[in-house]
Amino acid sequence: MSPEPYTNGLLDTRYPCADKSAVSGELVCVLDARAPQRGLELSPFPSRAVLQHEIHELILTSEVEAGPGKTVNQISYLGYFEVSQGGVLWAGDRVLIAGIEVGLLAGYDLTHFPNHMNLIIKTDHSLFTGFEAGYHPGVSIAFIFPGRPTQEEQNGK
C-alpha cells in the first residue's frame, strides 16, 4: 500500500483543496441522544468522497480540539441524511441544516463503515440533538467549502 500523504508529510501544503462543489442532501432520520464519553476516533484524512444516495450520520460536538486524527467524547446525535448531490467533504466545510449554519465539519469516524460514516460537526454552541432542534425528515443539509486559507492564515498569522 502507498504511504498516506497527509499524515506522512508528503504534500507541499496542508491545504491541497483549492475549491470544490457543495455536497447536499436531506435528513431521513432524526436522532435524540447524547454521549458524554463516546470515544469517536476521527480518521486522519481531511477529505472523504460521498456518493449520491449514500446515507451518513450527523453528530455534533463542542470539543474545541475536534479534527482529523483526534478523539471526540462529548457528542449529541442530530440524525442521518441521504446524499442528493455527491462530491468531496472536507474538514472545515461549513455545515448548514435547514439553511442555518450549525458548525464546521471536524472529521469522520468509521466505526460503522461501510454501512455509514459518522460525520462529526464542531460547534461553538451548546450541544443539541436533532429532535431538540425541531428537525424532521426532509430538512436540507449542505456542506459548503469556506475557501482555502490565505498564505498568512496557513502560517498562523
Image (spheres, rainbow, N blue to C red):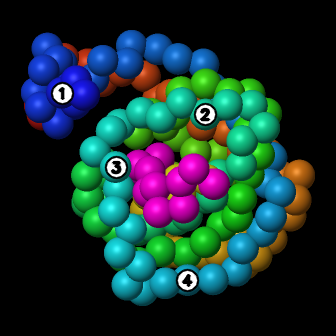
Residue occupied by mark 3 = 43
Q: Residues within 10 Å of mark 2 (few under 14, many from 20)?
A: some
Q: Nearer the viewer, mark 4 or mark 2?
A: 2
Residue type highlighted by circle 2? Val
Q: What residue appears at the point 47 percent right and 29 percent down from the top-left corner?
A: 146
Q: What residue appears at the point 26 percent right and 58 percent down from the top-left corner?
A: 70
Residue occupied by mark 4 = 34
Q: Where is 45 relative to 101, above or below?
A: above
**N-terminal of the two: label 2 or label 3?**
3
Left or right of residue 105: residue 73: left
Residue 113 is one of the magenta-drawn residues? yes
Residue occupied by mark 1 = 3
Element marked by disc 3:
loop
Element marked by disc 4:
strand
Magenta highlight range:
104-115
Q: Are marks 1 and 2 in contact (CB under 8 Å)?
A: no
**N-terminal of the two: label 1 or label 2?**
1
Q: Nearer the viewer, mark 1 or mark 4?
A: 1
Residue occupied by mark 2 = 50
Q: Are marks 3 and 4 in contact (CB under 8 Å)?
A: no
Residue 117 or residue 96, whichever sits in front = 117
Whole-angstrom CA distance, mark 1 to mark 4, is 36 Å
Quadrant of the rendering where the N terminus is positioned = top left
Q: Residues within 10 Å of mark 1 (few under 14, many from 20)?
A: few
